[in-house]
Image (cartoon, helix red, strand yellow):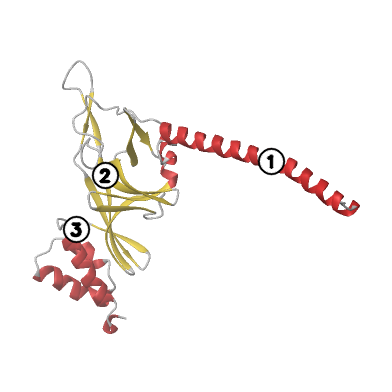
Amino acid sequence: MISKRNRIVFIMAGLLVVMLSPAQDVDKNEDVSAKSMYLETIEKFGKDPLLRNGPFYEYPYHRSEGNPFLMDLQFRRGTLVYRNRVYDQIPLRYDVFHQQIIINQQQKEESVQILLHEAYLSEFSLAGMHFKKVSLENDEPTYCQIVANDGDLSCLYYWYKSRRESHDNGNYKIYVFSEPEKRAYLNIHGEFHKYRNNRTFTRAFPREARKEVRSYLRTRDIKVKKADDKIMQQVISFCSTIMNSPNNQ
């Protein structure tokens, strides 16, 4: 015979089972609903929906001579740091005239071009070049190529293009874009120095290091204005060594 106390325990256990069963069904339904919503989102926006969170881009210069991009109209796979998250193998183009990044997203049979919000894009890499948002000469942050970086010394390029109007056609005006141009900077102990040639490059360094920097460039016949990235990396490495030597501190 079941005691009164045990009978109460059995009743409470039964009520608990009844109460938990619907809750489990609700949880299962919520899981199925969430999974369905996730798959639908992936199908529509891809695995990286944050990259789709921007205005659609349409190329406006079909009749122009040249283009506003650092290279050409082709999308090249690169790496982005967007909203503090790294995205690899993203097809992108760098518009140096407007200083903006356009990506190409393929979803099913649809190819969509997205203009990324520059406030959330801190750095990117493209065709072997690394770009980072930097404030030059107290200006607003802008993208600069980090050519070489060695501790307290780095070399940066700001790339841009100019544009003019042409009326040679007679029927309508067209835009003519220049070839890519750059402004070169040294960042020495957090201070930016713009340089145009060997003289202004050397002058950016502390007085006690200038003689050795000048000699290094002269003996190797290096013109910093025309030197490629690999040569500039070697130059910066040497200059960093000179700056950090006991004789120059």
Q: Residue furthest front?
A: 1
Q: Using a 10 Å C-alpha cutoff, classify the residue at mark 1 as few (fewer than 14 neighbours), some (14 to 19) or many (20 or more).
A: few
Q: Residue at x 71, y 43 (%)?
A: 20
Q: Of residues 62 and 185, which is closer to you in this image?
A: 62
For marks 3 and 1, the one nearer the N-term is 1
Residue 182, image x, y percentages: 24, 49
Q: Which residue is mark 3?
A: 229
Residue named by callout 1: 21
Q: CA distance from mark 3 to mark 2?
A: 20 Å
Give the mark toward the camera: 1 or 2: 1
Between the C-alphas of marks 1 and 2, the distance is 51 Å
Q: Residues within 10 Å of mark 2 (few under 14, many from 20)?
A: some
Front one among 201 and 61: 61
Is label 2 in a helix, a strand or a loop? Answer: strand
Category of crowding for the residue at label 3, using alpha-carbon neighbours closer than 10 angstroms: few (below 14), some (14–19), many (at least 20): some
Q: Are marks 1 and 2 in contact (CB under 8 Å)?
A: no
Q: What kind of residue is marked 1?
A: Ser
Q: Earlier in the sequence, mark 1 or mark 2?
A: 1
Q: Is residue 216 above or below residue 91?
A: below
Tell me the amino acid under the disc marked 3: Asp
Task: Give the x, y percent position of residue 246.
Answer: 29, 84
Which residue is most to the top?
A: 171
Say the numbered circle drawn on residue 66.
none
Mark 3 touches mark 2? (CB < 8 Å): no
Label 1 residue SS? helix
The residue that label 2 is drawn on is: 77
Q: Residue furthest bottom?
A: 246
Q: Mark 3 or mark 2: name the one nearer the start of the chain.
A: 2
SS type, badge 3: helix
Q: What kind of residue is marked 2? A: Arg
Q: Quadrant of residue 174?
A: top left
